[in-house]
Image (tube, rainbow, N blue to C red):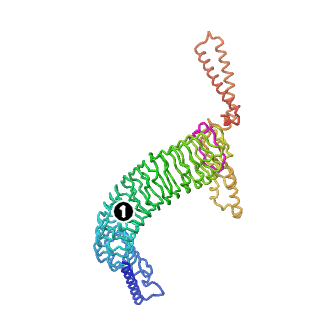
């Protein structure tokens, strides 16, 4: 086959040279211009033609054509006839296009392609027949297109692939058969495609893959089988796919783990998400040492054997959500390159002390919604950047739990039972910017080492009543505290920082908004002065950056003074004095002679007593305001 291909290529080159020589002899090149003189010769009406050296690219797409134009140049190398009304091809309409490399017939009404429709297309590399009305792959029209590399037959109504329809396609590398009506794998037809590298059979109605279905496709690298109805796989259905790297079985009806994938030694990416798989057996991927990614979410997986993910040295990401029957952390021996591990919604109660020895490259660890009580030391996981352990049973953070995790940026320990955190538990977390300890049992909070925090959550720790100084968190932007008065230390009652000058009259404008203003007003300053000014402006804003703290203090949760102004304070004291003096006089006057009290006097007396009690309550508030003057939050 190689000898015949080389001979055919040599013949095409010789033919092109002779034709170009003849053309050069009969067509004078005026001023070194194109032999076509401006508009290429033989360009069909309404079509757009462009010269490509001595060849021509012809675009006749979306013109409402009912057939192939008759006056196409023999030197046409690209022909686009897509989105027309061509319903049939004659056997000789394209035979003279010996230099044609790409032919587009997509989006027509083709229902049948006869034998010989593509005869003479010795140079054809790309053929697009998608979005037509074909009910089967043309039985003979595609045969012996030795140069064809890419064939699109997707989005038709194909339900039949004749056994010999691809005969002679020795160079075909890419084949699209997706979005059709296939119900089975056309095993015999694929035996004629030894050079095939990528194929998609997605969006069909295939229900079973038999043994050796792709046995002759040893060059295949990518295989898409997603969105079918596959419920069973032959144990040797993937045998022969020695170079397969990507296998997509997503969105099918598989009930069992596809153990047949163990035959794929070079597999790098495997997808079988959105199926009905309920368990993953031990040594599930023992034959796939090259796996980099496994996608198996949206399966009702309940059971995962402990050794399921062993010896996958290239695996980078492992995600498993909702496997409620898992009680032990999986044995990841040999899976040393793992960077992201997510095991949520299980019943894992403890982590092995060797977790970091097994996973030295781990960067993201999510073990939320488990039953972890005690934590091991993560010191050896020096690459960890994000840890999610919320909704567990953790009760204590020891001094060595997170020591030396200098790369850790986010730590989520919310919704646990943590009551004790060692004073130096966070002292070495130099990169930590987000810490969530909400809804725990904390009564105190260590601040050592948390100078870089920008987000801190402590809400829900009802025993945590002490104030936390804002000086411990110079970079803080968002904080959530158990009580509103604790936000007073972070300037929650202060007004926003305001800058007023001749260039910025908006009190709420930021440095970024300021820089967007028209710099034309600075024409008297040079660029360096302007840059220095902006640097000073930025530093000034940073020095006064505000902290968003919740729950925010308000009229009923003040920071410094119970009464917000002297007007209220004087008014309350006036009410207290008048309530005591005036109502006391009324009560004494009415009840001095209790035997002669009319009903009206009794009512007035009772009202006076009530007013006196209101005066008492007001006096209590006034006294509290006086005793906590300026430091209300500290005494509440």
In the rendered image, residue 138 lying in the magenta stretch gets the answer no
Quadrant holding the C terminus: top right
Residue with the mark numbered 1: 201
Q: Position of residue 537 (x, y in %)?
A: 69, 55
The residue lying toward the viewer, choosing from 546 and 229, is: 229
- The correct choice, above or below, for 22 with respect to 139 in the image is below
Q: Residues within 10 Å of mark 1 (few under 14, many from 20)?
A: many
Q: Is residue 206 above or below residue 39?
A: above
**Is 456 covered by the magenta stretch?**
yes
Magenta part of the chain: 439-464
Q: Is residue 29 visible?
A: yes
Q: Nearer the viewer, residue 512 or 138?
A: 138
At which x and y percent is residue 573? 69, 28
Identity of the residue furthest to the bottom in this view: 25
User: Would you say residue 229 is visible in this rendering?
Assistant: no
Identity of the residue furthest to the top in this view: 595
Element on which disc 1 rests: loop
Q: Quadrant of residue 16?
A: bottom left
Dominant secondary structure (helix, strand or loop) of the stretch shown in magenta: loop
Q: Residue at x 47, y 58 (%)?
A: 293
* The N terminus: image quadrant: bottom left
The residue nearer to you, when weighing 524 against 563, is 563
Residue 202 location, x and y as percent? 37, 61
Q: Percent x, y for residue 173?
A: 39, 70
Q: Nearer the viewer, residue 513 or 233?
A: 233
**Label tally:** 1
């Amino acid at each position: 086959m190689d000898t015949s291909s080389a001979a055919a290529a040599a013949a095409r080159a010789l033919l092109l040279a002779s034709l170009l020589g003849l053309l050069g002899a009969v067509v004078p090149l005026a001023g070194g211009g194109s032999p076509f003189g401006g508009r290429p010769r033989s360009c069909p009406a309404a079509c757009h033609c462009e010269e490509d050296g001595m060849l021509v690219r012809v675009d006749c797409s979306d013109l409402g054509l009912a057939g192939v134009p008759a006056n196409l140049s023999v030197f046409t190398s690209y022909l686009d006839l897509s989105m027309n009304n061509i319903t049939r091809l004659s056997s000789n309409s394209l035979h003279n296009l010996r230099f044609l490399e790409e032919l587009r017939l997509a989006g027509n009404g083709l229902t049948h392609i006869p034998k010989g429709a593509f005869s003479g297309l010795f140079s054809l590399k790309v053929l697009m027949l998608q979005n037509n009305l074909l009910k089967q792959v043309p039985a003979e029209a595609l045969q012996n297109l030795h140069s064809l590399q890419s064939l699109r037959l997707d989005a038709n109504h194909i339900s039949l692939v004749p056994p010999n329809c691809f005969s002679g396609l020795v160079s075909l590398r890419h084949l699209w058969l997706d979005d059709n009506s296939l119900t089975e794998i056309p095993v015999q037809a694929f035996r004629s495609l030894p050079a095939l590298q990528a194929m998609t059979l997605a969006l069909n109605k295939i229900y079973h893959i038999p043994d050796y279905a792709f046995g002759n496709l040893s060059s295949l690298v990518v295989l898409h089988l997603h969105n079918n109805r596959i419920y069973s796989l032959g144990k040797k259905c993937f045998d022969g796919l020695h170079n397969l790297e990507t296998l997509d079985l997503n969105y099918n009806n598989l009930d069992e783990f596809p153990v047949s994938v163990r035959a794929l030694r070079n597999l790098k990416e495997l997808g079988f998400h959105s199926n009905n798989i309920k368990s993953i057996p031990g040594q599930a991927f023992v034959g796939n040492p090259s796996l980099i990614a496994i996608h198996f979410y949206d399966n009702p997986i309940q059971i995962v054997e402990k050794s399921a993910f062993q010896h996958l040295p290239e695996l980078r990401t492992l995600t498993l959500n909702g496997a409620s029957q898992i009680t032990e952390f999986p044995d990841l021996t040999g899976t040393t390159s793992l960077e992201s591990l997510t095991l949520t919604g299980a019943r894992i109660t403890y982590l092995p002390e060797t977790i970091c020895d097994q996973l030295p490259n781990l960067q993201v660890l999510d073990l939320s919604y488990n039953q972890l009580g005690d934590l091991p030391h993560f010191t050896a996981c020096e690459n960890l950047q994000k840890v999610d352990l919320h909704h567990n049973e953790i009760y204590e953070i020891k001094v060595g739990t997170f020591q030396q995790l200098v790369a850790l940026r986010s730590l989520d320990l919310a919704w646990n039972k943590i009551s004790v955190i060692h004073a130096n538990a966070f002292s070495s977390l130099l990169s930590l910017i987000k810490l969530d300890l909400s809804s725990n049992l904390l009564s105190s909070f260590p601040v050592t080492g948390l100078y870089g925090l920008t987000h801190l959550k402590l809400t829900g720790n009802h025993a945590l009543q002490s104030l936390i100084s804002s000086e411990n968190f110079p970079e803080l932007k968002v904080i959530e505290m158990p009580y509103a008065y604790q936000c007073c230390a972070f300037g929650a009652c202060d007004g926003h920082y305001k800058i007023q000058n001749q260039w910025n009259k908006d009190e709420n404008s930021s440095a970024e908004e300021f820089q967007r203003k028209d710099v034309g007003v600075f024409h008297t300053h040079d660029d360096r002065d302007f840059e220095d000014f902006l640097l000073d402006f930025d530093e000034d804003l940073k020095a006064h950056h505000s902290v968003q703290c919740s729950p925010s203090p308000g009229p009923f949760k003040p920071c410094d003074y119970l009464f917000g102004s002297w007007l209220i304070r004087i008014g309350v004291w006036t009410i207290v004095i008048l309530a005591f003096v005036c109502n006391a006089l009324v009560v004494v006057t009415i009840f001095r002679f209790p035997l002669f009290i009319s009903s009206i006097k009794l009512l007035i007396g009772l009202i006076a007593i009530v007013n006196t009690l209101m005066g008492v309550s007001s006096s209590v508030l006034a006294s509290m305001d006086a005793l906590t003057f300026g430091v209300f939050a500290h005494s509440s």
